[in-house]
Image: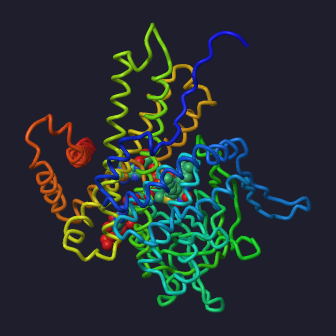
Amino acid sequence: DVGFKQDVPVVQNAFLEDPVMVSVLTRLLPDNVLQDISSDLIHICDWANTEGAALVDRMEADQPRLRQYDSWCRRVDELLVTESWKKQKEIAAREGVVAIAYERKYGQYSRIYQMAKLMLWSAGAGLYSCPIAMTDGCARVIELIGTQDMKDQVYSRLTSRDPKRFFTSGQWMTERPGGSDVGRTETQAVWNEEKKAWLVSGFKWFSSATDADVTMLLARTHDPKAAGSMKDGSKGLSLYLARVRDNEGKLNGVRIHRLKDKVGTKALPTAELELDGMVAQQVGATHKGVKNISAILNITRIYCGMSCTSAMQRFVLVSKEYARRREVFGALLKEQPLHLATLANMELQYRATSQFTFYCVAMLGRTESLDNNLPQVKERDIPLLRLLTPILKVWSAKNAFAMSQEAMEAFGGQGYMEETGLGRAMRDVLVNTIWEGTSNVLSLDVLRVMAETGGSVLELYSRTVREIMAPLKNQEQWVKSAKALEECLVLIAIRFTAYATAEGRNVLEAS
Ligand code: MFK
Ligand code: FAD
């Protein structure tokens, strides 16, 4: 045991060690709120570095399995998730990672608090952030359009801090004929008078977090008033809410066909599901399924932004830590100009993405707060958030994956070793370019918003940009001002929109 031993890079507390996050929160939150929540943010980082890190290692080492038959050849479809995965659920409830947003203790600022906590919690949660995102989205849909019974029986549990009561939710949209194009959905819902419920049958091609307690799902409605006739395309779809298992743990008309063999997100039990008479309740109006589920999409897409920001924060912090300890050609890495330039570029990307994410989160908080009748919310936040959410999702996913490569390279050969966790992080962050809408589909979503508003959202955009830029006189101020960074993001968004428009036109011209 002789010879050189590299000093190991360690991030002690991502909140305390990251001036970027502190500055974003200082700008967006009133002093008393930041003071109030700081100890919780410090605590969750400590948890992520200790118990969280140990749980993540175990979740990776011991992945979910499916026991399809018992020893007597009876079909059981038992999903075996690890103790560490179950523990994550308990912790998620206790830490209130969904509850904070709905208790609204800090009004419009509650979302910022929740997303800041989620961002730090994610480092120790592995992929448990995925079921939490869908749970949050499901809670929002029930809050907006659910029945009183759904609020009492389900919403209250999705937003509970009691691990024994806490429910998670799935989001079943994608089918074999189409994931982006859900109008090709084959699954059908038929009213059953005897059970006074809808019975849903079909095949769901991707179901993350198959251990969820409830799920929101799309199905084509047999209209009982029109002798069971169905409408084609997405206009024939309605939204349904169902328990995945009954109180004894028996699946509710679901057969688990197979667990997916994925490139990453290995700890997450993603399955193919056959539905055969799943008892469900309709949520919201018939044939408004896509519109009704879009409240989930818009929340989970912001979660993708948050999750990518969290990954980027870690990439930057560990790369900087390593640069402070690794010596090359007679100097520390942090003193090598070219390496410093690489780190600076990473830091810039991370800063931009943090600002962009929390800019959207702040708007989300305002639109959900009880003051959402304020003119600012109606006239600015709602349309701007609708426009920026898909842009945030695409921007953060593409950049976080690119940065995972830089972080890996910054560690040299060690970066390529599984033990550093950078390979896993790269595989995991990559999925954000695909789930909750691929980049091209979300680019088209941006065009959909522009078309639906007759372009007025772009005027709103440029007005907002001009207002924020007005006090900035020279480039120096741009660099110094946090406000300017916020504005850069709006500019990026505009450029992205222009890009999407131009691309769309080019494709049309070429075809
Ligand atoms: C840590 C992060 C973890 C995140 C958890 C990840 C777990 C993985 C979960 C999944 O991946 S779940 C599956 C996610 N699937 C998608 O995201 C589907 C991607 N495809 C689209 O988004 C398509 O654009 C879409 C399905 C919406 C196309 O459907 P349609 O019906 O062909 O679109 P159409 O006719 O334009 O829109 C129907 C209505 O919905 C319109 O309103 P109206 O009925 O009033 O006219 C649209 O304006 C509205 N709409 C569509 N997208 C919307 C929206 N409204 C608000 N927000 C949106 N995003
Ligand atoms: P397609 O829609 O067939 O897309 C193929 C390609 O076509 C893409 O590059 C896409 O960008 C492009 N494309 C599609 N339409 C257009 C267009 N109009 N113009 C230009 N390009 C276009 N789904 C769920 O419902 N629930 C889940 O829990 C869930 N979990 C998932 C977990 C993981 C790990 C993964 C990888 C996926 C999960 N999904 C889930 C599915 C995911 O949402 C879909 O895979 C995604 O929406 C894309 O759909 P698709 O696979 O059918 O691809």
Q: Residue furthest top?
A: 329
Residue 495 visible to the viewer? no
- On the image, which quarter does residue 214 sit in? bottom right
Q: Residue furthest right?
A: 72
- On the image, which quarter does residue 303 sit in? bottom left
Measured as percent of width and height from the top left, residue 338 is found at 35, 17
**Quadrant (top left/top right/bottom left/bottom right) for the N terminus:** top right
Figure check: 51 above or below 365: above
Task: Give 77 or 201, whichever is nearer the viewer.
Answer: 77
Drawn side of residue 418 relative to residue 97, left or right: right
Residue in the image at 73% along x and 54% along y: 83
Total marks in image:
0
**Quadrant (top left/top right/bottom left/bottom right) for the C terminus:** top left
Figure check: 485 above or below 3: below
Task: Give 46 or 360, whichever is nearer the viewer.
Answer: 46
Task: Give 94 or 505, whichever is nearer the viewer.
Answer: 94
Measured as percent of width and height from the top left, residue 253 is found at 69, 73
Measured as percent of width and height from the top left, residue 79 is found at 73, 59
Residue in the image at 73% along x and 45% along y: 62
Drawn side of residue 64 relative to residue 377, left or right: right
Drawn side of residue 269 relative to residue 250, left or right: left
Drawn side of residue 174 relative to residue 503, left or right: right
Residue in the image at 64% along x and 75% along y: 278
- On the image, which quarter does residue 372 sit in? bottom left
Figure check: 209 above or below 340: below
Measured as percent of width and height from the top left, residue 243 is found at 63, 74
Residue 150 visible to the viewer? yes
